[in-house]
Image (cartoon, rainbow, N blue to C red):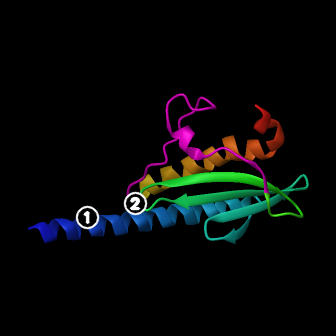
Amino acid sequence: METDRIAKLKERDKAMRAARDEILTRVGAWLRSKDFDRAGAGHFTRSQNGLLCHIGFQKHTSGRSVRVMCHVTSGTDAKTLVSGPWSDAYERPGSPNGKKYNFRWGTRETDIARCVDEYCRYINDVVLAWFHDPADKAKA
């Protein structure tokens, strides 16, 4: 009885990880359409105004959560100049921009598509806007 429950949980976790990977594949394709290059697993970059803009996806060990992080480096040095917003604060009511994003997903296609839309909307609303003047935003 217990082994059946554990087997079902493992199967569910595997399905959730597969859904997560599909979401990140689709978001990555969207980023490439925005002139970002894939710089590594879950890491995308784009040159802008003499800076290199970085977007990274941090997969949490549960397989059920992914954090979006960003920062900028100078075009000649890989050292982080300014760290940008993390997606965590935008999943809650009272987020910094007043919008709450739903990054939770299930294994159904409708959940995956909605989550892709939410990640892309967050990146467009928050991260790409932040990249326009990251030094100014760091002072705020």
Q: Is label 2 in a helix, a strand or a loop? A: loop
Q: Residue at x 77, y 38 (%)?
A: 138
Q: Nearer the viewer, mark 2 or mark 1?
A: 2
Which three-letter amino acid code belongs to the residue tagged 1?
A: Leu
Whole-percent x, y for residue 133 in the image: 83, 41
Vertical arrangement, residue 106 with respect to residue 1, above or below: above
Q: Residue 94: which quarter of the image?
A: top right
Whole-percent x, y for residue 15 in the image: 36, 67
The reply to whether the magenta stretch includes residue 45 is: no
User: Which corner quadrant holds the N terminus?
Assistant: bottom left
Q: Residue 19: which quarter of the image?
A: bottom left
With 121 as the anchor, is 75 left or right in this view? right
Look at mark 2 in the image and give the residue it sits on.
Answer: 62
Q: Is residue 16 visible?
A: yes
Vertical arrangement, residue 3 with respect to residue 138, above or below: below
Q: Residue at x 46, y 56 (%)?
A: 112
Which three-letter amino acid code belongs to the residue tagged 2?
A: Ser
Look at mark 1 in the image and give the residue it sits on.
Answer: 9
Mark 2 neighbour class, 10 Å CA radius: few under 14, some 14 to 19, many 20 or more: few
Q: Residue at x 73, y 52 (%)?
A: 71
Vertical arrangement, residue 43 with respect to residue 99, above or below: below
Q: Residue furthest left?
A: 1
